[in-house]
Image: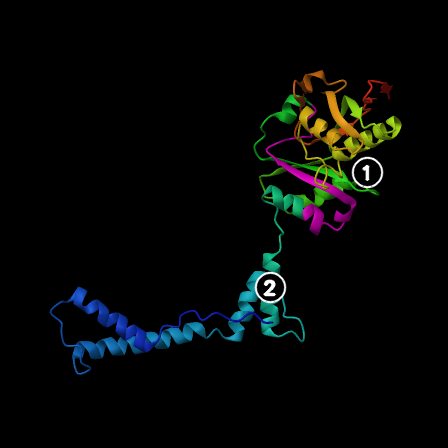
Amino acid sequence: MPIPLPDLDDTSYADLTAQAQALIPTLDPAWTNYNPSDPGITLVELLAWLTEMLLFQVSQVPPASTEAFLRLLNGPDWVRPSGASLDDAIRTTILGLRERYRAVTAADFEWLALNTWTDGKKLARVHCIPRRNLEAADPAARNADAPAHVSLVVVPAQGGDSGLNDALLQFLNLRRTLTTRLHVVGPVYLPVQISANLALRDDAVAQDALADARQALLDYYDPLKGPAGTGWPFGRAVYVSEASAVLERRPLVRYVEDVQVTAPGAADREQPDGVLLEAGELVQPGATPLVAYDATGQSYPS
C-alpha cells in the first residue's frame, strides 16, 4: 500500500478570515465594524485569499521535485527502477532509511552483527560493552574506563572459523562513528567449581540423582543455554544462593546443604556469597563434586 502524501496545511479561506477577525479586538479594540463593506475587512479577506493560494501550491509537490528529493536521499546516481511507480520509490526509500546502518549505540553493534552481517548466522551470541578495551593485555587496563573504546564480545556458533572476529571488525568499522575505537574479541571463560551435599528422596538412585544435578548446573551456567534459554549473562556473578536453588528444584533431591562456589586458580574472584566475573566473561563450569546422602545418612561420594 503506497504511503499517502501529507497535506502540509489544510487551513481554508474561512479559517484564515475567522482567525484574523478573532485577533482584531486584541490588536485594535476601536475597530468594531466587521462587515464586508469595511475596507479593513476587505483587506483581511484579500490576504486570506492570497494565503490560501500559497498553501495550496505548497501542498502540490510536482513529481520532478519528488524525484529530486529521492535522489538526495539515495545518492546522486539513484534512478527510479524501471516499472516502479513514484509511490513505490517513496516507500522503498523510507523503508531503507528506517533500517539500521550506522553503529552508534551498543544495541546497534549487536543488531548489525547478528542481522546485517552476511556471516551473522555463524554467531551464537554477541555482547557490546562500551568504554572498555578488552583487547588490552593488562587486566587492569581491560577493566579500566576507556572513553571512545567499544568492545564487542562474540560467541561463535558451531562452524565458526578463526577469522570470524577480523571479518566482523572490518564490517563494523565501515559503520562505526569516526571517533569510535572498536575491538571484536572472544569471551573469556572462567572455570567455576560447585560442591554441595544433597539429601535424596528415599526412592532415589544416588548415581542418577548426581548425574541429574550435575547436568542441571551445567545447563544453568551454559554460555548458550543459561537460566532463560539465551545463555549465561556476560559478567554476571555466580552466587551460592542460585546454585542452591538449582539443586533444590531437582525432583530426586529433598534438600541441599553446604553449597560452595569456588574459582580454581582465581581465588581473588571468590566472595563469601559466590564468585565474581569481569565484563565479557562467561562461566565455564568445571567438575562439580557433589555428595549425596539418603534419609539414613548414608553417603554416596561422586
> Is any part of residue 194 visible from this angle?
yes
Contact check, label 2 and label 1, Cβ < 8 Å? no
Foreground pick, 16 / 147: 16
Colour pattern of the rendering = rainbow
Say which residue appears at 19% left-offset and 69% top-offset: 24
Q: In the rendered structure, does residue 124 fall within the stretch colored magenta?
A: yes
Marking on residue 162: 1
* Displayed quadrant of residue 150: top right
Kindly identify the amino acid type of the residue bearing the numbered disc 1.
Ser
Quadrant of res 181: top right
Q: In the rendered view, does 228 fall on the left or right side of 149?
A: right
The magenta region covers: 112-137
- In terms of depth relative to the viewer, which is nearer, 77 or 235? 235
Is residue 227 shown in magenta? no
The residues bearing labels 2 and 1 have C-alpha atoms spaced at a distance of 37 Å
Residue 246 placement (x, y as % from top left) = 73, 31
In the rendered image, residue 263, in percent from the top left (x then y), is placed at 74, 20
Q: Is residue 80 above or below residue 202?
A: below
- Screen quadrant of the C terminus: top right
* Residue 200, percent from left and from top: 81, 26
Which residue lies under the disc numbered 2? 93
Q: Badge 2 local density, few (<14 within 10 Å), some, or many (20+)?
A: some
Using the image as rendered, state which of residue 173 and residue 92 is in the foreground: 92
Tell me, yes or no, if residue 75 can be seen here: no
Q: Answer above or below: position of 278 versus 227.
A: above
Q: Residue at x 83, y 42 (%)?
A: 158
